[in-house]
Structures are given as structure tokens and as C-alpha cells.
Amino acid sequence: MEGLKWRLLALLPLLASVILFYMKTPPQKPSHSECSLLDHNDFWISSKRIVTPKGVISGAVEVKGGNIVSVMEEDWQENVGTGQVIDYGEAVVMPGLIDVHAHLDDPGRTEWEGFPSGTRAAAAGGLTTLVDMPLNSFPSTVSEETFELKIKAAAKRIYVDVGFWGGLVPENAFNASALEGLLKAGVLGLKSFMCPSGINDFPMTNAGHIKEGLSILAKYRRPLLVHAEIQQELEDIADDPRSYSTYLKTRPASWEEAAIRELLTITNGTRAGGPAEGAHLHIVHLSDARSSLDLIKEAKSSGDSITVETCPHYLAFSAEEIQDGDTRFKCAPPIRDAANREKLWEAMMDGHIDMLSSDHSPTVPELKLFTDGNFLKAWGGISSLQFVLPVTWSYGRKYGMTLEQLASWWSEKPAKLAGLDLKGAIAIGNHADIVVWEPEVEFDLNDSHPTYVKHPSISAYMGSRLSGKVLATFVRGNLVYKEGKHALAACGVPILAR
Ligand SMILES: [Zn+2]
């Protein structure tokens, strides 16, 4: 024992010098070979199906220093010279998906998800940019100080680019300097709730708060995103809490309709010449495709600056199919009946719903209460991030959805909402954010499928057969994911609005 002690003591100077070395050496920026699975910085990607704003072309995209520097059709070979070409044959080359509604729960609730697992899942799913929500992390992102914590948490831990929404809450809504501090620090816009959010440090706002917030946002030309449900009086519901229909009754479509009706009394000010001109309101995760959607359509045609998203789970599932106790499907607003789902698809195809987002909102399996299966008490939120591309494609094909529509809903429109001028399309000058995937390849999403979110078992998509396999994901020209392999280092960039 004594001998061991002396030997350990003898090692102390060595240990001290190692610590000193690391203290003196500034943290190294990851090398190119750590950020990318590809040796080259400058290369061409060729394919017979490249989705561009001008349609699907056969040709090649030239990438240099992280940007797209040319997009060429048939005769591209003559221009390549000795350049490196990655030929993807018939696989689809498309702008990377931009998810404007993800809850990564970092800092503070990393046992739910966290930046590393969330962004690795994103990369594997063909998403190249996420915009993180201000709640479910702790503390909520509602001030300049809490935003700093968020940026710190993301530094060197994100595998794709990540932007951030700030929170509009009663505490900051009438405090212009606080809100401006948050906007100047770089949030891409604000998010608020018209009903309890389920998170204590993110209280709900009323129309007064929203009006005030919009007037500040107008100056910065950044959007306000709103969870549009207002609680209404309910008759006593004494039904079985394990039955999905019970949960559905607790959040009827009239809640969405009431919220949207109230919002539209504010958004009419955003019309040309109106007092709130320059402001923009975005309704998140619309579920009701009936009266709520009609109201939005009307406001749009009157010139209100308003957009709306829905999520793949409202397009994939219907209330009738959800089994008793299967709380993986609980989210708010709830998944409604099959006829409503048909109407949502109709609105997608007709362009009345502008875009899609995941609303990836995971938790720990314990809070899903699988043993009790109590829909009224379980955490509400659907885990979906890695699978939104194959899910959208698998269900949308039946409605005649095209690759151009897919790129518009998942890249072009979200980029526009978040003010990401250099993202959202395969076009010269844009970031080389690209997904390569095979729409025709089917797979079973089960335990043996490689998944990268923290808790794959809580995903409502587990057990599905899907179509669309992601082959490769490029973020700013870095090959961050290739068939089951990720780049070594997290080289995604936090996106700050300026
Ligand atoms: Zn959400």
C-alpha cells in the first residue's frame, strides 16, 4: 500500500505538466477532416434528379468553400476539368431540410434530448438547419442572459446549423428594452403561447402581449410564432383517460378556432398601410383543417402578413387509429379524425398551408407514462426529428406530392420565415446545405434501424414502414452524415440574426 502511494506521488509532477499544457493551449478549431467525411473542400455533386428552384434537372452542383458556386445541366462534364465528382446517379439531390420548430431541450433538460443527439439525428434525417424553440430547455430563452446560456450550450455541440427563437412572455412583452435586447442578441424571431405551455417558466400571453410584441418585431422584420389554442369551458369529461378519444375531447378544434379568431384581429394591422405593417405572424402546428383554416385563408386573401405550418404527425396519423394507452401519439393540439387529415392534405396541395415543421418535442420515456397509458397526464409531444423526410414522402406520394413541393415546404418557405437568405434552395451563392436520398427505397423503422435521438422508443413512428432513405447530408459543404456514419466533430454553426 505504502509503495503504491509513493509511486502515485511520483506521477504528480507529470500530471501537473499535462494539466498546464492543456490550460496554456487554446482550444483547437476542429480540422476539415474532423468536420467532414470528405477530404475535399471543392467538389461537384452530380445526379439525374437535382431539385432546383427552376425544377428538377439532370446535372451537377459545384461546391467551393462551403457554398454552391454553380448549378449546371446536361453539359456540366465539360466544365469539371480535374475536379472531384461525386456521382449519385438516380438519387435525389435536394436542398437540406430546415426545421423551424424543434425542441432540443438544451441546456437544462438534456436527459430529454440535447444538442448533440438532436443534431446528429437531424443530420441522419437530411435536415441541415434547425431552429430551436425557447421552451423545454431550462431556463426558457426569454432574455438576453438566458439566450447567452443557450448559445454557450450549443457551441461546438451541434452537427448541423442551429438558429433560435426567443420567447414572448408576459414578463418581457411590455418591456421594450428587454425584448430589443433579446432581438439584438440574435434570436430569429419570437414564440408565444395562447394557452398554458406545460412549462412553468414559460407562461402564456394574451392578445395585448402579442400586439405589443408584434410592434417591436416589426422594426426588426422578424416573425412572431404563436401556439394558437385558447382554453374554453368544457363539459365534465368523465371518460376513460386511457382512451385517445377522451384526450381529443379535452382539446376540441374550437380552441384553435378561438385563438385564430383573436389573432386575426391583430394581424389585420399588418396589411399594407396598417399600423403593424412590417410585422409577420406565423401560426405553428395547425391541426384543425376546418374553420381555423378557413379563417386563415380569408385573412391571407385580405392581405394579412400571416403564414401557417402543420406537422407530419397530423398528416400521417388519425385519431381513429390511435390505440388505448399509446401516449406516444399525445401532442397539442391533438391529432384529429381521418376526415380532418384529408382536408389538411388538400390544404397542403392547394398551397393554403405554407410549410411543414417537425415540432420534435421529446421527453424521457418515464413521463410518457406507458404503464398507466393515461392520456390526460402523460407528457404531450411527438418525437420525430430524424424521420420527417421519409414520413412526408411516404404519406404525400398518395396525394401526388412532387419533389418540388417537398423542397418548398421543408426548405424554401422555412428559410424565408426564419430570414435565412443563404439557405433553402440549390442556387448559386447559397450555402451548400444538401440532402441526397433515395425516395424509392423502403425500410422498416424498428429497433434495428439506426436512430440517433436520445429516446427512439417514444417515437410515434416506431413500427412504421417508410419510403425514402437518406444517403448523405452536407452542411456548408461538409459531408456531416453518410450512410450510418457521422463526421467526427460537431461543426454546425449557431445562426444569429443581425
Ligand atoms: Zn412545439
Image (spheres, helix red, strand yellow):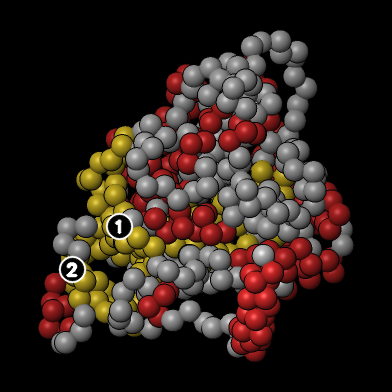
The amino acid beneath tag 1 is Glu
Q: Residues within 10 Å of mark 1 (few under 14, many from 20)?
A: few
In this rendering, does residue 304 appear at all? Answer: no
- Mark whose residue sits in front, 1 or 2: 1
Element carrying mark 1: loop
Q: In which quarter of the image is the N terminus?
A: bottom right
The residue that appears at 68% across and 58% down in the rendered structure is 107
Report how far apart the C-alphas of labels 1 and 2 lie in the structure.
15 Å
Q: Quadrant of the C terminus?
A: bottom right
The amino acid beneath tag 2 is Asp
Q: Which of 151 and 318 is in front in this view?
A: 151
Q: In this view, does 404 lie to the left or right of 77?
A: right
Q: In this view, does 495 lie to the left or right of 422?
A: right
Q: Which of 324 and 217 is in front in this view?
A: 324
The residue that appears at 85% across and 69% down in the rendered structure is 177
Question: How many numbered circles does the render carry?
Answer: 2
Which quadrant of the figure has residue 229? top right
Residue 422 in the image, given as x and y percentages of width and height: 46, 73
In this rendering, does residue 173 appear at all? Answer: yes
Residue 483 — which label? 1
N-term mark: 1 or 2: 2
